[in-house]
Image (cartoon, helix red, strand yellow):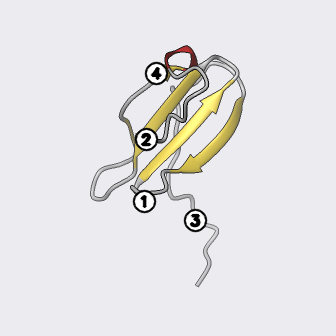
Amino acid sequence: MRSCRLLGRLEDAHTEDVTQVRFHPLHRTALISASLDGLICRFDLSPPHEAALAAPVTAERYGDSDPLQ
C-alpha cells in the first residue's frame, strides 16, 4: 500500500544541485547521489538507523570509472 508519509530527509551532503540518485545495484540499502558540487555521496539506509552519510568522495577520484563498483 502506498503512503505519502515522509520516510526520511537527506540533508547537509551537497552544496549544489543533485543531478543523479541511484540505489547501489548490489547493496539495496546504499543510496548514491551525485551533484554539481563534484561530490558523490553514499548513504546507509539500513534500519534501525536513520539515513546516514557514509562516504562522501570527490568525483575526480573516480575519473571515468564507475563509483558503484
Mark 1 or 3: in front is 1
Q: Mark 3 sits on what residue?
A: 5
The Cα atoms of the two marked residues, 2 and 3, are separated by 20 Å
The Cα atoms of the two marked residues, 3 and 4, are separated by 31 Å
Q: Tag 1 or tag 2, which sits nearer the N-term?
A: 1
Q: Tag 4 or tag 2, which sits nearer the N-term?
A: 2
In the rendered image, which quarter is residue 28 located in? bottom left
Query: Please, what secondary structure does the residue beneath circle 2 have?
Result: strand
Q: Tag 3 or tag 1, which sits nearer the N-term?
A: 3
Q: Mark 1 sits on what residue?
A: 28
Marks 1 & 3, CB-CB < 8 Å contact? no
The residue located at (48%, 41%) in the rendering is: 68
Q: Mark 4 sits on what residue?
A: 57
Q: Amino acid at mark 4?
A: Val
**Horizontal and vertical percent position of residue 11:** 53, 33
Q: Mark 2 sits on what residue?
A: 43
**Horizontal and vertical percent position of residue 58:** 52, 17
Query: Please, what secondary structure does the residue beneath circle 3 have?
Result: loop
Mark 2 or 4: in front is 4
Query: Please, what secondary structure does the residue beneath circle 1 have?
Result: loop
